[in-house]
Image (cartoon, helix red, strand yellow):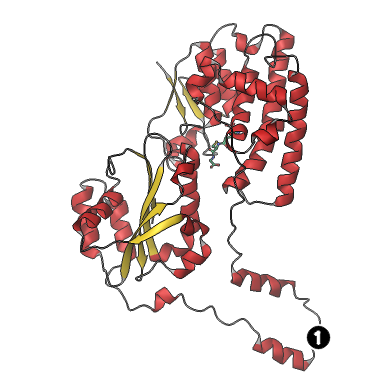
Amino acid sequence: MALVLHSFPGNKNAFKALIAAEYSGVKVELTKNFEMGVSNKTPEFLKMNPLGKVPVLETPDGAVFESNAIARYVARLKDDNQLFGSSRIENAHVEQWIDFAATEIDSSVSRYLYPRLGFMPYVQTAEETAIASLKRALGSLNTHLTSKTFLVGHSVTLADVVLTCNLYPGFSYILTKKFTSDFPHVERYFWTMVNQPNFKKIMGDVKQAESVPPVQKKAAPPKEAKAKDAKKEAPKETPKPKVVEAQAEEEAPKPKPKNPLDLLPPSKMILDDWKRLYSNTKTNFREVAIKGFWDMYDPEGYSLWFCDYKYNEENTVSFVTMNKVGGFLQRMDLCRKYAFGKMLVIGSEPPFKLKGLWLFRGQEVPKFVMDEVYDMELYEWTKVDITDEAQKERVSAMIEDLEPFEGEALLDAKCFK
Ligand SMILES: N[C@@H](CCC(=O)N[C@@H](CS)C(=O)NCC(=O)O)C(=O)O
């Protein structure tokens, strides 16, 4: 029976076990319908890995997390597996390069790439440090590989599996030819590895990044927080001349103006009632939730909007596309009181299409959302005409995650509520 590996598809950390399994004649299968942020937060998953991270391997003797430990476990299922080398010293070297791949390559690639994909805050000096560490590590790897095809010995070992997987996000998303050409032996090594049949079967065709992802626009820190911080920093004991005090009083921060959406005439639609109905409907979704939605919908107090991602051709990697939507929904947190949304990742093959449906308080896409959430301008916004039955049906289908959607499979559907 196959061992079950919990992860989203396309995860380089899951590739390690899947490639090791190919070399070892072990059956490992990815969980079906894994939903990042949902499947890895269930109590059952947290029992397997309290950190809630993937991958996790389920074995008959218990679960294993940490991708390198999982890959080692899988490889050990084959006696005298050459993936560990063929002598004690080779085995030590395999372990040495696995640690090098984790501490010198993976950490630097992550610190360079993830802020650019918006998964971590971008800090220019931190990026410079990450690039310097990465160049240093690639330089030493390049020297080692000058006269070698494999890291250790004369065939693929687990060290090649782990190192290639850790190089993979770098080559695929950020390390352009301009960057890697300083390390020709690393280049040759990487392309040789990813073209080995057992790698290719899992990774598919690997293509090198053609450009460095631009730095994500950052939301300005909330004005209120700035005012509070300024207050904190003011020296406590300094006596102020009266005239300055008077001026300070005049300049005291005014109470925060109400959100204009709170000043709209009351609506008969209670957004929380709709969100509750959406969450609590487990069966007969069309008859209960969708019907309930249209019964509640108040076209005077709310408006519906379709959004279409303008740059779908960039959505070539499933998990990056899904994370893009995840980041967008996190940034929409500031309008939770005034909005409900569905975002669909459409297609079974890249490039994936991103389309969404949003319900906003008022008749416009709220200005403060447009101003604060940079993702908004990456989408084309079209107001739904609910007198048009076809548009109404499209709204229902999007709320319902109806599949196929416009003739295509859904890779993912996320809800903002
Ligand atoms: N050192 C871990 C890293 C695991 C990891 O960071 N997984 C990411 C996906 S690649 C994750 O699950 N992130 C979810 C989270 O941080 O909550 C390994 O090699 O398995």
* Residue 287 appears in the rendering: yes
Residue drawn where x is 30% and y is 54% of the image:
278
* Secondary structure of the residue carrying numbered label 1: loop
Question: In the rendering, at what x and y percent does residue 78 appear?
Answer: 54, 9
Instruction: Classify mark 1 as within 8 Å of ligand 1 or not, answering yes or no.
Output: no
**Screen quadrant of the C terminus:** bottom left
Residue drawn where x is 57% and y is 33% of the image:
172
Residue drawn where x is 63% and y is 19% of the image:
160
Position of residue 215 relative to residue 248, above or below, is: above
The residue closer to the viewer here, 341 or 336, is: 341
**What amino acid is at disc 1?**
Pro
Q: Quadrant of ligand 1?
A: top right
- Counting labels gives 1
Q: Disc 1 marks which residue?
A: 239
Apparent side of residue 191 relative to residue 372 in the rendered image (left or right): right
The residue closer to the viewer here, 293 or 206, is: 206
Residue drawn where x is 78% and y is 26% of the image:
140
* Residue 62 appears in the rendering: no
Question: In the rendering, at what x and y percent does residue 283 appear?
Answer: 23, 45
Position of residue 222 relative to residue 137, above or below, is: below
The residue closer to the viewer here, 32 or 346, is: 346
Question: In the rendering, at what x and y percent does residue 401 appear?
Answer: 30, 46
Position of residue 253 relative to residue 14, above or below, is: below
Question: In the rendering, at what x and y percent does residue 314 appear?
Answer: 49, 43
Position of residue 189 relative to residue 227, above or below, is: above
Dot 1 alpha-carbon crowd within 10 angstroms: few under 14, some 14 to 19, many 20 or more: few
**Screen quadrant of the N terminus:** top left
